[in-house]
Amino acid sequence: MKNQLKALVVSNRNISVKILNWTLESAYSVEDALAILQRQDYRIIAVDVAIEDSEKQKLESIAKLFNESVSIVHFSTEKELEINIKGAFRIQKMAFLNHNYLDNAFEMELACKLNMN
């Protein structure tokens, strides 16, 4: 079974957007989001711009303690939420692919050098 993509959405309003192949879990406050993050790991967290800046900073700093590779995006509309989540996923995926490509190139060069000796 393929892993389903997950994102945590922090907003004090109801979010009804559906993103294909994604499970969105909602938290209505930063404290709720932190409680959820203690139970489950998320690679993408979407925060409503209506949340206070001090609360956003608190969430970002604590979320980075739980998972260094977490991406935190901000949104004001549901369409922007969808675009930002997909964009954050693409950036994470590209970073992962670039990392694997460099590791693979090193292994190939090493194998060639070993075969030449």
Image (cartoon, rainbow, N blue to C red):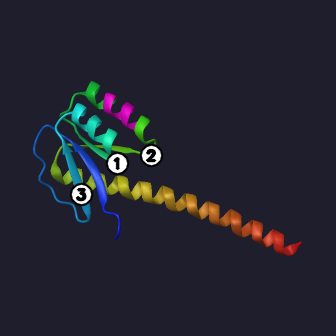
- Name the residue carrying label 1: 42
Q: CA distance from mark 2 to mark 3?
A: 19 Å
Lower position in the chain sequence, tag 1 or tag 3: 3
Q: CA distance from mark 1 to mark 2?
A: 9 Å
Which portion, as a residue range, is magenta? 58-64
Count neighbours of disc 2 (C-alpha within 10 A) and say few if under 14, some if 14 to 19, many if 20 or more: few
Q: Amino acid at mark 3?
A: Thr
Give residue 14's position: percent from left, percent from top.
10, 45
Q: Main secondary structure of the magenta part?
A: helix
Mark number, residue 33 = none
Nearer the observer, 78 or 55 = 55
Q: CA distance from mark 1 to mark 3?
A: 11 Å
Q: Amino acid at mark 2?
A: Ser
Give residue 94's position: percent from left, percent from top.
46, 59
Query: Which residue does the image show at 25% across and 38% down from the upper left?
Result: 33
Dividing the picture into quadrants, the one containing residue 17 is: bottom left
Lower position in the chain sequence, tag 2 or tag 3: 3
Mark number, residue 23 = 3
Residue 103 magenta-highlighted:
no
Q: Quadrant of the C terminus?
A: bottom right
Give residue 46's position: percent from left, percent from top.
27, 45
Count neighbours of disc 1 (C-alpha within 10 A) and say few if under 14, some if 14 to 19, many if 20 or more: some
